[in-house]
Amino acid sequence: MNDGIQPRDWEVRTAAYRHLIDTFTAPGTEDLTRRLDMPATEVAASLERLAAGHQIVLAPGETRIWMLHPFSATPTDFPVEVEGGTYWANCAWDAFGIPAVLGGDSHTQTRCGESGVAIDFGVRDGTLIGGRVQDEGTFIHFAVPARQWYDNIAFT
Amino acid sequence: MLSFRSEADIDLWCERRRLARGAVMDLELIWQLAQVWYAGRTSAEWRGRSAEQCQAIVTAVGLDGEFWKF
């Protein structure tokens, strides 16, 4: 899937992650243009190639970043509180992906996908915390087989 | 993927959407999977992964079967 990606595209990708991690918000084309001293048209073309190669996800029909896995550019049901602020994860798995990539502690307050009952979990000192509601456990459900994830990356 | 308080909730959720039950894991395993899956993801050296590399990661944490084929 990476065949069409050019060397500079990887720099755009890295800068996008850096911006999101530093500011808690996903970068727009203009932010990347500034960070990389690169024309907006080239940034946009890079974003398109990265998306085609499944390295980022753009909002449908736009060159606006939607997902930089495990981060979401828009609010979701999976906020990930860390020291200094809150990121948004794309899904329950990504709520663990964020402390995995950042290496620090995290806390996520969400709800059961069926009953709506509050669930909270996170990571402290590299160890799982929470995730239990009374005597029940917490379970993550992957609805779509791995090979089909990119058929609709917003529903997995 | 969503989080649920019980496996019965997962079955109800699938039933109401007429979806087959997918793969279910507890938080210990998802945390383990997240750590290996997302390792190096934000690095400047990241160049993506092949289907074979993805396969090796899920196999290493004990996930197998048709559902986990890339």
Image (tube, rainbow, N blue to C red):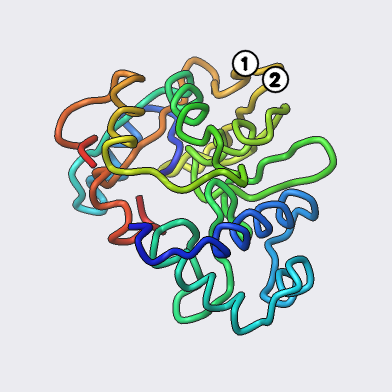
Tell me the distance, in whole angstroms, between the alpha carbons under discs 2 and 1: 5 Å
Would you identify the image quadrant in which residue A37 lies? Answer: bottom right
Front in this rendered view, residue A48 or A90: A48
Q: Is residue B26 left or right of residue B35?
A: left
Q: Position of residue A93 (x, y in %)?
A: 48, 37
In the image, residue B46 above or below residue A45: above
Q: Is residue B10 left or right of residue A60?
A: left
| Residue drawn at point x = 79 percent, y = 50 percent | A22
* Badge 1 density bin: few <14, some 14–19, many ≥20, Cα 10 Å: few
Q: Is residue A129 left or right of residue A31?
A: left
The label shown at residue A127 is: 1
In the image, residue A66 above or below residue B37: below
Type of the residue with mark 2: Arg
The label shown at residue B49 is: none
Type of the residue with mark 1: Thr
Chain for disc number 1: A
Question: What is the secondary structure assignment of the residue under circle 1?
Answer: strand
In the image, residue B21 above or below residue A133: below
Q: Which residue is mark 2?
A: A124
Front in this rendered view, residue B69 or A155: B69
Q: Is residue A107 left or right of residue A3?
A: right
Would you identify the image quadrant in which residue A12 lies? Answer: bottom right
* Badge 2 density bin: few <14, some 14–19, many ≥20, Cα 10 Å: some
Marks 2,1: beta carbons within 8 A: yes
Chain for disc number 2: A
In the image, residue A23 above or below residue A124: below
| Residue drawn at point x = 18 percent, y = 44 percent | B20
